[in-house]
Amino acid sequence: MNRPEFLDWIAEITGKRPQTPELYIRAATHGSHGQKDYQRLEFLGDRVLGLVIADYLYHQFPQEPEGQLSQRLNGLVSGSVCGDVARQIGVGDHILLGKQARDDGARQSMKVLGDVMESLIGAVYIDHGMETARSFILHHWESRFTTTVADIRHPKSALQEWAAANNRKIPTYELVDKSGPHHDLKFTVRVQVNNIGEVEATASAIQAAETEAAKKFLEKFT
């Protein structure tokens, strides 16, 4: 890592010069690189992200019931969205990885990118406080807030609702494969609706694979 270049990038994406550079270095450090990795900051950043987004939605959509707000929230704080935001701002170029993780493509892993995005939020929160963390999040999530509830409805919920509406049994999910190195496992899940069909999908977490399988099923059979 080129430290000055990295800190310049942090200042660019956050709008603030780092007061505690080591926080951001830790936020970008994968477990394969050293003991002081991003996991604790990720834990914190995940909670800060959820609070900021929930607060924004509560005030931005005063007429929506809790169920619709929850759908919006779940869509906006998902690992895939965090990973996509991270990819757009160039997080992958700055992650500190061990050799094996680099060779295995962890720099492009959406799970790793999403985790680092959350850890960066945690670092900003500790370094500059909630208002700066809020501005950081809202700036990088801004274009996603106009998405309709229907567009961000969770695929698993949508599939279950479709099955019920068509007098079918609830969808069943089965883990059919687990592969890859420990830091970048891949899970393949099969979803099936009786007398309709089945679809498989692979992702870096079981829940993400289930979500992707449900999405593919809806695209194929509905």
Image (spheres, grey):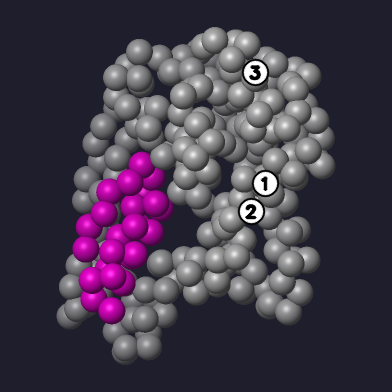
Q: Is residue 213 above or below residue 65?
A: above
What amino acid type should be assigned to the residue bearing mark 1? His
* Residues at marks 2 and 3, CA–CA distance in whole angstroms: 24 Å
**Residue 195 vertical placement versus 198 (above, below):** below
The residue to which callout 1 is attached is 139
**Disc 2 secondary structure class:** helix
Q: Say left or right for 36 vs 59.
A: left
| Residue at the image point whose x is 29% and y is 84% from the top | 168
Q: Helix or strand or loop: what does disc 1 sit on?
A: helix
Image quadrant occupied by the C terminus: bottom left
Q: Sequence order check: which comes first, mark 2 or mark 3?
A: 3
Seen at 31% across and 72% down, the residue is: 218
Q: Position of residue 194 (x, y in %)?
A: 21, 77
Task: State the residue at coordinates (75%, 22%).
Answer: 17
| Tag 2 residue | 142
What amino acid type should be assigned to the residue bearing mark 3? Leu
Say few, some or many: other residues with alpha carbon within 10 Å of mark 3 (under 14 / 14 to 19 / 20 or more): some
Do tag 2 and tag 3 residues touch (Cβ < 8 Å)?
A: no
Q: Residues within 10 Å of mark 1 (few under 14, many from 20)?
A: few
Q: Residues within 10 Å of mark 2 (few under 14, many from 20)?
A: few
- Which region is colored magenta? 199-222
First reached walking from the N terminus: tag 1 or tag 3: 3
Left or right of 96? Residue 160 is left
Q: Are the residues tagged 2 and 1 within 8 Å (C-beta)?
A: yes
Q: Position of residue 8 (x, y in %)?
A: 65, 20
**Residue behind mark 3:** 7
